[in-house]
Amino acid sequence: MNVLIIGSGSREHAIAWKTLQSPLAEKIYVSPGNAGTARVAENIEASPTDIPSQIAIAKEYNIDLTIVGPEAPLAEGIVDRFKENNIPIFGPTKSASAIESSKDFAKKLMNKYQIPTGGFETFRSFDEARNYVLTHELPVVIKANGLAAGKGVTIANNYDEAIRALDECLGQRLLGNAGDTVLIEEFLTGTELSVFGFTDGNSISTLIGACDYKRAYDGNHGPNTGGMGSYSPPPFWTIALEEEIREIIMLPTIKALAKEGRPFQGILYGGLMLTATGPKVLEFNCRLGDPETQVILPQMSSDLLEAMLSVINGTLDKTTITWSGKPHVGVVMSSGGYPDDYTTGLPISGLDSQNMNSLLFHGGTRFDSQSNSVVNNGGRVLTVVSSGETIQKARSQAYEDIQQIHFNECFFREDIAYGV
């Protein structure tokens, strides 16, 4: 099979790395890719959301399967357009992707079908939202309704923070259309967990859990980012917990989407809070997560392409998807200043260190022909992923190997999987 992977981050590099292990894979292309994917596949320059160009690429290169990494092209209907052109593609349709692209839709769906989640109210008016916040106990969670690359969430511990977050969305419109509508949600306490499963719209595979770190700095301080690191599986991940999440959250959501005329085929990603009264949904995503993909795909002991084809063909219940359960820890190396302004074009050294025992997945990188070197080209630049007999052994290896890689102004959290 000729396989096209759409996206440019560490998630897409990890997907390409895993795809390469499949005996079904003949040639792999990544669009637009990065300096890391160029080592295992052929990069083709095109924006993930330029759907006509992606269709043209699929036709020109005789693509047998397209895998969509990021959420934006899914929300814009890339799967629908590929299907109209009879090109096999893995991922949910535009209507099913609303489970991520519209938090208001997702929360209303959960309420309608009694899928456990926190309370919420939706607002389009700054004044109404502000008045609501001022009459409620804190903390509250303020979320932009639309896609905001992991940055549209504020946990407001005081009224100033809450009003500032509302003003950024509804007043200053810093998030554009994504912040036209704002949700004010109940603040849930407990242990946060990301859960992933393949689904063909009827059944769901065995699930896998991971924990990620969204804040920029140690101790969960600083602004929200797309994710600064992760580990999997968590020590509390058990067969009983997996079964509970499957039965009260994941399967009911798949059935609910089908009943609403939005059958979901792809990866369903539940961001959950394990509360004192049981698991509750914080939000859903309609694709693999980043940085979780980098620590879960190395645990996948079955064939990725076989799994994806079974989703497309509606035969998932006849396909066995297995996970090794071996502990993995991933640490993200970021550009100084991320998630705000940062400098790009800085040379990266140590990428080919012979002493490294970790996997290295590229995110914001590109090859610079002028300096004849790989340079940083984004906020989250690399993910160093190690495995071990325990989470702590995997963690130690990741931090040992990360010391061998350098670029100016680089920073990373030093507490990923600490004390787990």
Image (tube, rainbow, N blue to C red):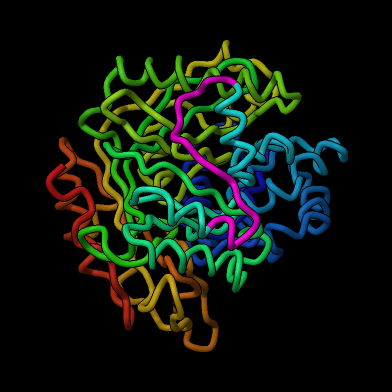
Q: Is residue 167 left or right of residue 135?
A: right
Q: Nearer the viewer, residue 275 or 396?
A: 275
Residue 186 vs 52, above or below: the answer is: above
Give the residue furthest to the right: 84
Q: Residue 91 sits in which quadrant?
A: top right
Magenta stretch, residue numbers: 113-129
Magenta stretch: residue 128 in it? yes
Q: Nearer the viewer, residue 409 or 394?
A: 409
Q: Position of residue 197 (x, y in %)?
A: 49, 28
Q: Is residue 104 left or right of residue 400?
A: right
Q: Which residue is rendered at x = 40% and y = 45% of the image?
A: 292
Q: Which residue is rendered at x = 55% and y = 33% of the image?
A: 267
Residue 73 vs 275, above or below: the answer is: below
Q: Which residue is rendered at x = 55% and y = 56% of the image?
A: 129
Total labels drawn: 0
Magenta stretch: residue 265 in it? no
Q: Residue 116 sits in which quadrant?
A: top left
Q: Which residue is rendered at x = 27% and y = 42% of the image?
A: 328
From where the camera sits, is residue 141 visible? yes
Image quadrant where one finds the N terminus: top right
Residue 43 vs 63, above or below: the answer is: below
Q: Nearer the viewer, residue 130 or 43?
A: 130
Q: Position of residue 139 (x, y in %)?
A: 34, 51
Image quadrant where one finds the C terminus: top left
Give the residue furthest to the bottom: 370
